[in-house]
Image (tube, rainbow, N blue to C red):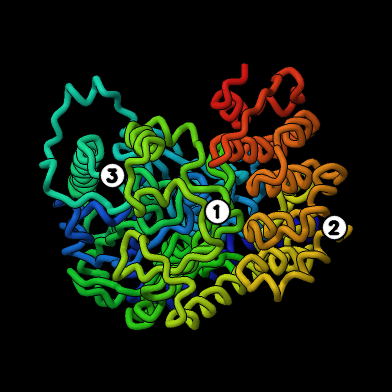
Amino acid sequence: MNKRTTLSLFRKYFYTPVIFLLSLLIFFNIGCKEATDTYVRPNIVWITSEDNSKHYMSLFDENGVETPNIEALAKQGIKFNHAFSNAPVCSVARSTIITGCYAPRIGAQFHRKMKKVPMPGSVKMFPEYLREAGYYTTNNSKEDYNLEKSESVWDESSKKATWRNRGNDQPFFHVFNITTTHESSLHFSREEMSNYNPRTEMHSFDIEPGHPETDLFRYTNAYYRDKIIEMDHQVGEVVDELQKDGLMENTIIFYYGDHGGVLPGSKGYLRETGLHVPMVVFVPEKYREVLGVEAGGSIDGFVSFIDLGPTVLNLAGIEVPEGMDGKPFLGANIRKQDVDQRNTVFGYADRMDEKYDMVRTVRKGKYKYMRSFQPFNFDALMNNYRYKQLGYQEWDELHREGKLNPVQEVFFKSRAPELLFDVEEDPYETVNLAGRPEFEETLEELREELNRWMGSMPDLSLYPEHLLIRDAFDNPVEFGQDNNSVINSYLEIANYACLDFDTVRDGIDEALHSKDPWKRYWALTVCSSFGERAFEFENEVRKISNEDPEALNRVRAAEYLGLNGLRNPVPVMTRALYAAEYPAEGLLILNSIVLMQDGPDRYSFSIEQSRIGEKVRENSEVKRRLEYLGIE
């Protein structure tokens, strides 16, 4: 037997159990006899509902409906007033949860994935640590990870997965996923509307200020609230099963939404309605004292999805791996007053299906800072799946007919690179405070906070996706560390868009002439953010649009010229699409084509599908863009 095999057996049969037992003793601060004779490790159950923000439940918001089963859990536990998804879409949010890591750091930030990425460094998906410590882990049943999963994560992950197959006296971790409120539930037709009358009274709530006040939007709101009531009943059914099995006194139950809601402008967008989720944790009486929990209490501190995995590990007495970004918010070693001091959370959005738009947010206390890295990609830019919803279709029709008020019209306009909101006074983020002198200090503070966070990861999205797939996704974290200084130089250039043009003019000029193609890429993007103020670079931008060896840079240059009416972008973009070698490269070019077609100037494209490379045109996301453009 070799040395490595001996060490492995030692860890398996002696080292791991001993360390685990010692962890329990330290964690619960009790003697050995008490630990073995009276303490039972908690079972932990997660009940997740898809596509729910906190805004539609009266437990969290007066504009919501009653959810008696979720409310009953809160009465026997704690309500989290500030729980956030870090991403407003399923796969990225769930990748964040399962790893406890920020997705743009580990390469899991794109929805839908074109390539799965490995787990970061020595970190495992957190249920694997639970299994190693003796827990029975089950998932019923959605995964949707952007990462490669080992066979050691779940004892069972399927629609039939249950805690009931565990061993005698074996603690368990179980996830139950409720799909009732998923976005697809709002893909009803006009005919289906005529056959269903919502139980929620149509005038019992306020319409969001950014939405048009129409019968369809009222119906959609009421129908969605009906789905939430149905979902709450299903939460109760899971709790009933635990009660039937006599498990409630030993089981900590989490309920939370897997990201924000699906009324237009929420899912897929970094608004509070896309990020701020409901969350309650039921804590059995026997655990309340050791966890410092009072029944019916609440926590005001900020927690987010990076914290969920570390919290479960902490509750099970397992040390949180160093490679995780999150911090536990429950446990015998966690003080409520410390959690209540947490006041900062970060959000990220990149490609959503076929639609590209890189946006980052930081919320600190009541202020929310939103940084749009391609602000010309207006929110309403076509996403085929979103626009299956009648509400999106009507919103777009009213926009084209000029029937929206200024707040409702914002969805169809390009954004400023920086937005600042007081989300306590303005919960639907309608009043941009950036640019007001009295908020200058707050703006600068949050800008610096976001830049520190992005730079420290570093944020891999400062490279285009196709390059990450080609060069980085075999080991994204290592790639990020190896290229940290370069990535931060891209961030510095991208942030010229937030500064006074006269102070960054020379920096833009230098970047446009750089030998590094992605410095040129971000300089061109900054030019588009400045618009007419960057006209002095027109000649250089024209040169790049004709001669740059990178197709994406030719497109970015043509985009600037097209957005500002200086040159028809169609020929350059069309040729670049035909020359694209990678699906993600072609998809990003198509994003610019749709922007040019649907933007104010309504450029007309005539694209021959047969001239697009086979590898590019066969990609499922590319097909969606081609379908929308009417290309067969």
**Tag in front: 1 or 3:** 3
Position of residue 600 measured from the top left corner of the image (x, y, whole percent)? 54, 41
Position of residue 238 measured from the top left corner of the image (x, y, whole percent)? 24, 44
Let me know if residue 50 appears in the view. Answer: no
**Disc 3 + disc 2, Cβ < 8 Å:** no
The mark nearer the N terminus, 3 or 2, is 3
Which residue is tagged 2?
516
**Disc 1 + disc 2, Cβ < 8 Å:** no
Q: Nearer the viewer, residue 168 or 195?
A: 195
Q: Circle 2 — which element?
A: loop
Q: Circle 3 — which element?
A: loop
Q: Residue at x 36, y 73 (%)?
A: 366
- Amino acid type shown at disc 2: Asp
Is 579 displayed left or right of 50 in the figure? right
- Amino acid type shown at disc 3: Pro
| Cα separation between marks 1 and 3 | 43 Å
- Figure disc tally: 3
Is 313 displayed left or right of 232 in the figure? right
Position of residue 327 measured from the top left corner of the image (x, y, whole percent)? 48, 70
Structural crowding at the residue carrying mark 1, measured as other residues with C-alpha within 10 Å and reported as few (<14), some (14–19) or many (≥20): many
- Image quadrant containing the C terminus: top right
Which residue is tagged 1?
125
- Amino acid type shown at disc 1: Met
Let me know if residue 75 appears in the view. Answer: yes
Residue 212: mark: 3
Residue 540: mark: none
- Image quadrant containing the N terminus: bottom right
Q: Residue at x 29, y 70 (%)?
A: 425
| Residue 331 versus residue 256 in the image, above or below | below
Is 305 displayed left or right of 282 in the figure? right
